[in-house]
Image (spheres, helix red, strand yellow):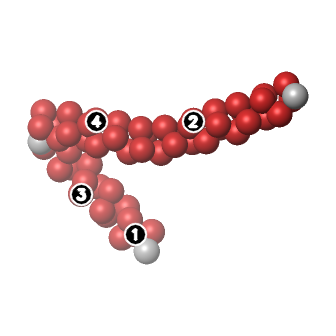
Amino acid sequence: MADFIAKTASAIDGFINKHSQYVRPILGVVLAFLVWGVVAPVIRILANSFLIMFHQAEF
């Protein structure tokens, strides 16, 4: 399994190096969407819970 992962990673790396001028911007956009998709809800949840705690502490 580890060998398969290493081979796949190597193949992907080779593909990226061969087509870097096309692949890197696309990967950057995809990564940005993934990060935003993961980070934004977490920030929203944390902000909401913080606001709820803050409002409860007020009263």
Which residue is found at the position 73% from the left and 36% from the top? 52
Residue at the bottom extreme? 1
Query: Circle 3 — which element?
Result: helix
Which residue is found at the position 78% from the left and 29% from the top? 55
- Mark with earlier residue (1, 3): 1
* Label 1, label 2: how far apart the Cα atoms are: 37 Å
Which residue is found at the position 64% from the left and 37% from the top? 48
Q: What mark, if any, has residue 28 been given in the picture? A: 4
Q: Is residue 46 left or right of residue 6?
A: right
- Mark with earlier residue (1, 2): 1
* Label 4, label 2: how far apart the Cα atoms are: 21 Å
Which residue is found at the position 25% from the left and 54% from the top? 12
Q: What mark, if any, has residue 3 been given in the picture? A: 1
User: Label 4 sits on what residue type?
Assistant: Gly
Query: Circle 2 — which element?
Result: helix
* Label 1, label 4: how far apart the Cα atoms are: 27 Å
Is the residue 58 above or below the residue 46 in the image?
above
Query: Circle 1 — which element?
Result: helix
* Coordinates of residue 46 in the picture (x, y in percent): 65, 37
Residue that mark 2 sits on = 43
- Mark with earlier residue (3, 4): 3
Mark 1 or 4: the one toward you: 4
Mark 3 or 2: the one toward you: 2
* Label 1, label 3: how far apart the Cα atoms are: 12 Å
Answer few, some or many: residues within 10 Å of disc 3's Cα (few below 14, many 20 plus, some between 14 and 19). Answer: few
Q: Nearer the viewer, residue 32 or 21?
A: 32
User: Label 1 sits on what residue type?
Assistant: Asp
Answer few, some or many: residues within 10 Å of disc 2's Cα (few below 14, many 20 plus, some between 14 and 19). Answer: few
* Coordinates of residue 15 in the picture (x, y in percent): 17, 50
